[in-house]
Amino acid sequence: MSEYIPTYDDILSAAETINGEAVRTPLLRCDALDEATGCKVFVKPENLQRTGSFKFRGAYNAISKLSDEERARGILANSSGNHAQGVGDASRMFGCASTIIMPADAPVMKVARTKAYGAKVIHFDRATEDRDAVLAHVEKETGSIIVHPYNNAMVIAGQGTVGLEIAEDMQALGHQLDRITVCTGGGGLTAGIALSINAHFPYAKVHCVEPASFDDYRRSIESGKLERNAATAGSICDAIIAPSPGTIGFEVNKELLHSGLVVTDDEALAAIKFAYEELKMVVEPGGAVALAGVLKHGKEWAGETVALVLSGGNIDPDVFVRAISK
């Protein structure tokens, strides 16, 4: 059976599902960001979302679509921390157990918060072990239902509500949108946002943004086929390191993305500092790359109206101090 590809209608349905549970985060403006880029920039702060990232949206939507019997089997997911927390919290709300496969080097805070939501955590070594193989082994042992962090149509639909809110709010303000930058790992958030933005602003350019040496999405968009990263660890942007694009989201993104942008770890750290000093926002490295992309390329887009997503704020204190001390 072929994979189901989500549609804009699925995003509208997801918006109804998560209404009253997820936070409708605001659109922010920042004079310093406009001055640094020459653009009119709108910021969507999903670091203020429940569990500290956009991931709650997709997790809640996907789990809501399961039957009572399926939920009774428990929820299983793999994640470096943000999807883990989203699944943990959503599972708790639906009264079902959750187990998360997490890399052994996941940020300490993310592990602690995942456990605090009631999830069981199983660690693996992402440098030497295949997380999907570990996931499959646990699935076979437990019979739990997998809610994949990005290769799941209902997860993508839930994440797409980020783009829906951006589009609705911008239209309510009477603004058009020229382009948007999105933090990208496996591509679920990017695909959902691309569907929503295309429905409202079909001429807007959508850019995925990735850390240097982990730009599988940029390369995949350029080649037209799924590309893989040579490594699965080695960037501070742990939240958005994926081995390869998810097949479901890629079917959307290969048609709707304009191009991919790449930023270094230092540029991500600089974006964290900018967000703290100018936006008064605490953002994690993977959640800051869309801002880093705008700071890096904004002058090329001078005069345009640009949106960006701060996708998460679950940062360990030592990394935050490193960023704001630079």
Image (cartoon, rainbow, N blue to C red):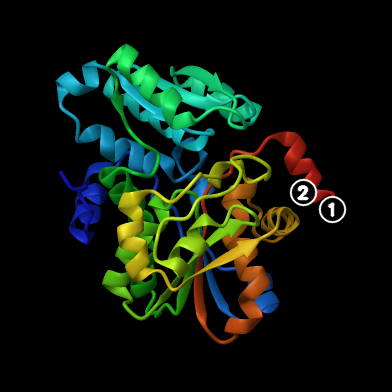
Most distant residue in the top direction: 141
Q: Position of residue 186 (x, y in %)?
A: 45, 48
Give the side of residue 199 with respect to residue 24, left or right.
left
What residue is at 40 percent from the left and 45 percent from the top? 23
What residue is at 31 percent from the left and 29 percent from the top? 146
For the N terminus, give its image quadrant.
Answer: top left
Most distant residue in the bottom direction: 303
Tell me where residue 96 sits by quadrant.
top left
Q: Alpha carbon of mark 2 to alpha carbon of mark 1: how far?
A: 6 Å
Q: Are the two marked residues, 2 and 1, in contact with CB atoms closer than 8 angstroms?
A: yes
Tell me where residue 40 sits by quadrant.
bottom right
Which residue in the protein does label 1 denote?
326
Q: Position of residue 139 (x, y in %)?
A: 33, 20
Identify residue type, mark 2.
Ala
Give the side of residue 59 with respect to residue 219, left or right.
left
Q: In the depicted view, which residue is nearer to us: 220 or 292?
A: 220
What residue is at 19 percent from the left and 36 percent from the top? 65
Tell me where residue 225 sits by quadrant.
bottom left
What residue is at 37 percent from the left and 60 percent from the top? 193
- Residue 323: give its label: 2
